[in-house]
Image (cartoon, helix red, strand yellow):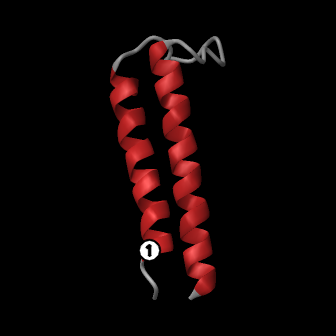
């Protein structure tokens, strides 16, 4: 069960990082790659925030609940 908690924690961390990248692209702070359709598009700020919150919740749950 320790392995499942570790994998869930890593997965949640990656989801959170992807969400932060989406927020950065949606706001135009992280305009890479230049040809990305997500740059300066406000819907990606919302989706990035949602992904970041879900990632944090997954990490929290993987550390909180003992299976």
Label tally: 1
Residue ID at (60%, 71%): 7
**For residue 45, what is the image quadrant?**
top left
| Residue drawn 48% across the image and 38% down it | 19
Q: Quadrant of the N terminus?
A: bottom right
Which is nearer the eye, 65 or 38?
A: 65
In the picture of the structure, the residue carrying the numbered disc 1 is 64
Residue 13, position in %: x, y? 57, 53
Instruction: Determine whether the residue tagged by mark 1 lies in a helix, strand or loop.
Output: helix
Give the answer, above or below, for where 21 lies relative to 51: above
Badge 1 local density, few (<14 within 10 Å), some, or many (20+)?
few
Q: Position of residue 42 (x, y in %)?
A: 35, 17
* Residue nearest the observer in this picture, 36 or 52: 52
| Residue drawn at x 40%, y 26% as measured from the top left | 44
Q: Residue at x 51, y 46 (%)?
A: 16
Q: In the picture shown, does residue 57 fall above or below 63?
A: above
Q: Where residue 53 appears, x then y in whole percent?
A: 39, 47
Q: Please tell me in which quadrant of the rendered image residue 32 appears.
A: top right
Q: Position of residue 52 (x, y in %)?
A: 44, 43
Q: Residue furthest front?
A: 64
């Amino acid at each position: 069960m320790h392995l499942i908690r570790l994998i869930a924690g890593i997965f949640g961390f990656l989801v959170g990082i992807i969400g932060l990248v989406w927020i950065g692209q949606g706001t135009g702070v992280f305009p890479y790659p230049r040809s990305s359709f997500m740059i300066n598009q406000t819907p990606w700020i919302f989706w990035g925030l949602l992904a970041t919150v879900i990632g944090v919740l997954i990490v929290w749950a993987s550390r909180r609940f003992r299976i």
